[in-house]
């Protein structure tokens, strides 16, 4: 259990964290999600002890660690750019924390071999980091962090430096690893898809504050603000409020609460059809509203560019719409 | 896992591409090659050959006699030992200076940084006079080291100051700070992080900087000649000894012979540096 209590962090001329309160449950995989500059990495580094908060407290499993040096916190930290010890073999990299703790040689060897098996780097013991690909380096870094059996595993944009394919693979792999190892894990990312895919809890950060924290579904279905809603998925703006494109309801006749709009473009994306609409009351030069409908719906409506349709958010259930 | 491994095989391919590129760029034409050959011959190789030939002009017997005389051996031994000490001291203090210049922020940092190169730019005889002004017979601080071995060491330290600093500085700037943070998070104290993470990464740079300052110290003349007093068997270094042979004793062949020995020492050091650098580079970029 990690508790962050009203943490503030000032840099010379930058207020990075503004009264952050956050509770992270033991054994969970939590994503800190936010745009760059939102303070998510700073918060992670404060938890690790790599940054000292200007005020506030960090509590790990009931112990106040705010003034504890990072090396005494028992935390595994994984960096975006791997931070591999370039002058050491893969074996020595993973063994580093154990050697610092003066564990018996046989135990270290056994533990390292086991971890390298877990991360899929068995047989790479004698290699050097420069002989590994990015994905392999990051898995080595994970093994290195896990070797000290940390109470908490902190990952700072761990897949940010990898290409899309490797990133997706490692993401799935991390999720499986977490199910096996069960260590409390906090992952910093700016990629909402990554957060939704991997995490069981998401804390969305904006301008040094937690905008909302909760289960991915709850955040998606009941966002607390326009910021959270627009950060967690596609949005369309209709009548001064935000709505998910797939929640928009199109019809050829006028209905209660519907807005008149002209079809600008119909894009067929296989099962999904995207309809770009220009509401009749939209100011000149406004961005079109994008509605997402199924292929069956599109065929029933027989939409073409130039058609007039009526569009509305689902009646009685206007989850995402926040008055502007 | 097999799919991950197969999609991550970039490095070896890239290296092979590099070799191809180098091979293609290899043919620069006969003219530049010829100019370089002539230039290096005229400036370096032929004079060296002439010196070697001259040293053997009176036969190998007199060559051996010249280099094995007590004065020659003592001068050489002193030169090598004092240069080694200077290199060792530089390895420590130079690394420290580079560390402060890279990692600490203080007013006047730019000035200090520029000052490091001054011993490089200064004519070495001026360096010698500078030291005499402070540590000579009329020393304003009451410290007189003239005509002692300490004076020679001091002069050598002065002129070799930049080598380690300038070789370590760029490596330290490039050094991944996150490596140190990773070490810290894994439980290492600041001392352990320095010994196990920082120092091994700086080692090739420290060694090559120290080797360069050793090579420079072995050949140093200008800064030493005044402050050392050139006391035979005590403070006389090889370069000064050679100068005396040539100018005062009128023994140009003996001077050439001792020079060849000094030359061999420098060459060995330079080759040693290359080997060290290659070994340091191999692991980093294999």
Image (tube, helix red, strand yellow):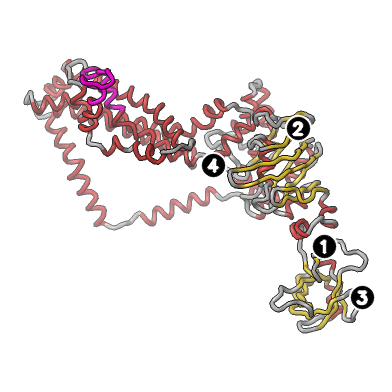
Q: What chain does badge 3 belong to?
A: A
**First of labels 4, 3 by sequence position:** 4
Residue that appears at 51% across and 32% down: B198
**For mark 1, what is the residue?**
A322
Question: How many marks can you see?
Answer: 4
**First of labels 1, 2 by sequence position:** 2
Q: How far apart are marks 3 and 2 (CA)?
A: 53 Å
Residue that appears at 70% across and 45% down: A18
In the image: residue B136, left or right of residue A229: left
Say which mark, if any, is on residue A256.
3
Q: How far apart are marks 1 and 4 (CA)?
A: 51 Å
Local SS, label 2: strand
In the foreground, B121 or B91: B121
In the image: residue A155, left or right of residue B216: right
Local SS, label 3: loop
Residue that appears at 24% across and 31% down: B127
Read off the magenta span: B133-157
Say which mark, if any, is on residue A60.
2
Q: How far apart are marks 3 and 1 (CA)?
A: 19 Å
Nearer the observer: mark 2 or 4; the answer is: 2
**First of labels 1, 4 by sequence position:** 4
Q: How crowded is mark 3: few (under 14 residues within 10 Å), some or many (20 or more)?
A: few
Q: Residues within 10 Å of mark 4 (few under 14, many from 20)?
A: some
**For mark 4, what is the residue?**
A130
């Amino acid at each position: 259990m990690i508790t962050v209590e009203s943490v503030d962090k000032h840099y010379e001329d930058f207020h990075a964290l503004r009264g952050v309160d956050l509770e992270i449950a033991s054994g969970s995989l939590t994503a800190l999600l936010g745009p760059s500059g939102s303070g998510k990495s700073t918060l992670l580094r404060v938890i690790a002890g790599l940054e000292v908060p200007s005020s506030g407290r960090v509590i790990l499993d009931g112990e106040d660690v705010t003034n504890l040096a990072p090396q005494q916190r028992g935390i595994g930290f994984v960096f975006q750019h791997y931070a591999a010890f370039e002058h050491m073999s893969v074996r020595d990299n993973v063994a580093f924390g154990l050697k610092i703790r003066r564990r018996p040689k046989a135990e270290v060897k056994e533990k390292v071999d086991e971890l390298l098996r877990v991360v899929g780097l068995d047989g790479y013991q004698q290699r050097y980091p420069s002989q590994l690909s990015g994905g392999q380096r990051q898995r080595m870094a994970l093994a290195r962090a896990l070797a000290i059996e940390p109470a908490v595993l902190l990952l700072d944009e761990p897949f940010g430096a990898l290409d899309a394919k490797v990133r997706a693979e490692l993401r799935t792999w991390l999720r499986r690893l977490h199910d096996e190892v069960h260590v409390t894990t906090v992952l910093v990312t700016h990629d909402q898809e990554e957060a939704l895919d991997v995490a069981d809890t998401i804390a969305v950060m904006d301008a040094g504050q937690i905008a909302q924290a909760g289960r991915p579904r709850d955040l998606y279905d009941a966002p607390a603000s326009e910021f959270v809603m627009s950060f967690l998925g596609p949005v369309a703006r209709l009548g001064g409020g935000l709505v998910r494109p797939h929640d928009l309801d199109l019809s050829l006749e006028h209905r209660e609460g519907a807005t008149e709009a002209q079809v600008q473009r119909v894009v067929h994306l296989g099962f999904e059809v995207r309809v770009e609409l220009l509401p009749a009351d939209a100011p000149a030069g406004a961005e079109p509203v994008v509605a997402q409908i199924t292929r069956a719906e599109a065929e029933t409506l027989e939409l073409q560019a130039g058609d007039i349709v009526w569009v509305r958010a689902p009646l009685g259930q206007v989850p995402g719409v926040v008055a502007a | 896992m097999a799919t991950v491994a197969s999609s991550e095989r970039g490095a070896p391919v890239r290296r092979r591409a590099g070799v191809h590129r180098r091979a293609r760029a290899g043919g620069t034409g006969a003219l530049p090659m010829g100019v370089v050959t002539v230039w290096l011959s005229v400036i370096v190789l032929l004079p060296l050959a002439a010196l070697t030939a001259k040293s053997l002009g009176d036969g190998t017997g007199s060559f051996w006699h010249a280099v094995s005389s007590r004065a020659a051996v003592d001068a050489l031994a002193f030169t090598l030992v004092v240069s080694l000490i200077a290199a060792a001291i530089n390895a420590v203090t130079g690394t420290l200076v580079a560390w402060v210049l890279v990692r600490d922020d203080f007013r006047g940092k730019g000035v200090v940084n520029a000052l490091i190169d001054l011993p490089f730019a200064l004519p070495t005889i001026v360096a010698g006079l500078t030291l005499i002004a402070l540590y000579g017979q009329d020393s304003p601080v009451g410290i007189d080291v003239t005509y002692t071995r300490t004076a020679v060491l001091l002069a050598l330290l002065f002129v070799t100051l930049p080598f380690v600093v300038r070789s370590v500085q760029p490596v330290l700037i490039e050094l991944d700070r996150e490596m140190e943070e990773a070490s810290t998070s894994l439980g290492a104290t600041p001392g352990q992080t320095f010994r196990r993470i920082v120092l091994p990464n700086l080692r090739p740079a420290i060694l090559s900087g120290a080797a360069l300052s050793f090579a420079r110290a072995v050949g140093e003349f200008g800064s030493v000649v005044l402050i050392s007093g050139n006391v035979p068997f005590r403070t006389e270094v090889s370069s000064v000894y050679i100068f005396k042979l040539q100018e005062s004793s009128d023994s140009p062949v003996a001077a050439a012979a001792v020079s060849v020995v000094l030359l061999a020492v420098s060459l060995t050091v330079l080759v040693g540096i290359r080997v060290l650098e290659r070994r340091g580079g191999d692991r980093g970029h294999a």
